[in-house]
Image (tube, rainbow, N blue to C red):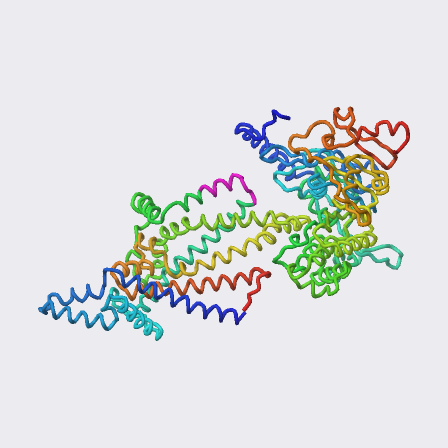
Amino acid sequence: MADKKHYISRSESRAIAKENSRAIRHFEKLKKRKCKPEEYTTVMQDDHNIVEFDDLHTYFFSDAGTVKAVNGVSFSIPEGSTVGVVGESGCGKSVTSLSLMQLVQAPSGQIVSGSIRFKASLFKRDARGRKIPVYETVTDADGKEQFKLDAKGRKIIKKNELGGNVYEMEDRVVDIAKMPVDAMRSIRGREIAMIFQEPMTSLNPVFTIGNQLDEVGLLHIQGISKAQVKAHSIDMLKLVGIADPEGVYKKYPHELSGGMRQRVMIAIALLCNPKLIIADEPTTALDVTIQAQILDLLREIKGKINGSIMLITHDLGVVAEMADYVVVMYAGKVIEMGTAEDIFDRPLHPYTIGLQKSKPTVNEDVEKLYCIPGFVPNPIDMPNYCYFRDRCEKCIEKCAGEYPGYIQVTPTHKVACYLYENAKEDGDAK
Amino acid sequence: MVKYIIKRLLLAILILFGVSLIIYFLLRLMPTNVIADNYRISHSNGGASEEEIERGLQALLAAYGLEDNSFFGIIRGYFLWLGRFLQGDMGESFKYGASVQDVIGQYMWLSFGISFAALILEMIIAIPLGIKCAVNQYGKLDYIATILCMVGIAFPSFFLGNLFIKWFAVDLGWFETGGLSSGISPDAGIAYVIDILWHLVLPMSVMIILSIGGLMRYTRTNTLEVLNADYIRTARAKGLSEGKVIYKHVFRNTMIPLVTQLSFTLPSLFGGAMITEQIFALPGIGNQAYQGLLAGDIFLAMGYNMFLAVLTVIGVLFADLMYAVVDPRVKLGG
């Protein structure tokens, strides 16, 4: 490494800039293209999953070179479960979730390859691309079903319990990585909702809470009246445990505390009954007592909406409490995944073991908190051996070889480490 | 709110007192004095002796508190002026032979009309352009607009004004070189209005080109800042269209500093564009005040500067009030 330069020469910098602008133009064009839904329709590998990440690569084209923030991530979120994604800052866990929403900071950040399969329920369209409404029907004297007509003889569109129009829906598995932004918009907020890390800055300071809630309802529930949206928004505020929903509805974000704002964010996320909620470090910016309340709330709502949660955090305690499955990420790759019991009771990867050790515990008396030695490798020039090798205490000869593949230790537990190559053959998890 | 405004107005009185004192001192230190010049000219061929003229002049100057140029003499003169000013008498403009209020009142509206129309056009062009540039940062439009704006900012008004006169008035003959009308009588109605507008095309273009750059860059910077905010990501995560994100969530936040910035233009709105008006020989307040100042018309210069000072104070107060209107986080405390 001694001959490695710590600067970029002018010509190198120019070459990077040229390459970046070419790549960015290419991907932006793909995102803005018009295409038929068939182009991004695909099939799930396992029908029980709601989301499947498959070899996802999300890169940032920076001035210093291409940063491979997410570098071949594959995992899936089963329906009705909570999946925790853990890892230290900068390991790509947030970028993975933003890729799922197509919200990676453009233009420098782009999904380069791989696929994100999502089981969506989309509006059925007729030949001219319009939504097909469902009409009210009555059974006439002959026992035949007929359309109910209004005073002017027009068919009446069926209303759902919120007062919105009912349209014919179809279940369709889409590949979000290939979806144009236009189509993505009907999934954002309606099918997948996101709760962000910073409740203090995630709400627009110049609009009232009510305005920001109603906006989502008016956008995604067609034919709903303003009064109905307001009633629904206030219901949601009540659902997330806000004591005075009518009062909060009229308030501005700066008049609320951090915990209240995070509750409002959750209310916004719940408004359209999404199938999947992404919670990107929802408790990091809150103090400990509020953290517990918000986690309880998330667990409670998961039961109510019958959906899945993708919980991103660096707090192992949070994951232990919430998650059914855990994915451990390091430097843009998944290094270990399994059920929560697998990861907490039988961690295999030296990094996961190190993470567990560096967690502060109350009842043990330790002089100094454990910390994993060394640093994460530079994301611009990743080595092609195991990224954790230089920091690993259990490094063996084989580690000099190329990046290890996944080893299925038990049916639910996978790890990317050479240490366990033989473990599988022996049928021994330890 | 009312308490806050009253407090600010009381403070404004103190500020205006200080401002007027400084301006008065500076004006009194000028070597020219239009009263003395006019008096000498009108009495030089009347047969009166030099001594008589001097005595008459001193008496006249004493009536306005201008006879003594020592420190205490100026102080005394200042309070004489202040006393009349507080009674609503801003003094006589000797250059124009009318009271200062009348001079300002007469010429102000032309300047206001020009500046106001220019400001509206400037906003219509600069704000959307700034937002467009920010959204397509480092795109073709952004680079072109930035270069043109820099050119606009870099030109001094007298240079651009003269350049325009040379190109469009002298060489091409499309517009008039200056003035407000080419002698069509006001009775001609629509033709008269068109004639005036025709004369105003060049000066207004100069004013817009010079000021558009600043506002556009300001809008662009603010928009860029807002575009990176977390709440914009939230807005996108809701599934809103890009247009709605930009024109509702981004623009409403960009507006906060813009409103403040625009409130500060109040003095220049009424005060006229001194140099531009002069180049195009427009009878606006800026040009008239400039001529008065050159001639040493102390009371006109004093009145004009106080007029600007009052407008500035009101503009700043207005900016603060508007700030509370557009940003719900701002609460004006007493």
Does residue A221 appear anywhere in the picture? no
Rendering quarter of residue B74: bottom left
> Left of A281 or right of it: where is A364?
right
State the residue lying farthest toward the bottom.
B87
Query: In the image shown, does A125 or A233 lie closer to the viewer?
Result: A233
Toward the front, the furthest residue is: A367
Query: How many numbered circles are shown?
Result: 0
Query: Where residue B326 sits in the image (x, y, percent)?
Result: 56, 60
The overriding secondary structure of the stretch rendered in magenta is helix
Q: Is residue A223 magenta?
A: no
* Pick the front one: A236 or A402: A402
Q: Position of residue A396 (x, y in %)?
A: 78, 26
Residue A266 shows in the view: yes
Judge by depth and name the residue closer to the eye, A185 or A265: A265
- Relative to A187, is B278 above or below? below
For this orientation, the residue located farthest to the right is: A427
| Residue drawn at (9%, 68%) of the image | B49
Quick one: quadrant of the C terminus of chain A?
top right
Where residue B75 sits, quadrant-wise, is bottom left
- Point 16% across, 71% down: residue: B56
In percent of width and height, residue B117 lies at 42, 57
Task: Determine the image quadrant of residue B113.
Answer: bottom left
Residue A132 spot, x, y in % from top left: 75, 49
Q: Looking at this view, is A375 or A16 the one in front?
A: A375
Is residue A222 toward the left or the right of residue B274 in the image?
Answer: right
**Which stretch is magenta?**
B135-147
Image quadrant holding the N terminus of chain A, namely top right
Does residue B137 show up magenta in the picture?
A: yes
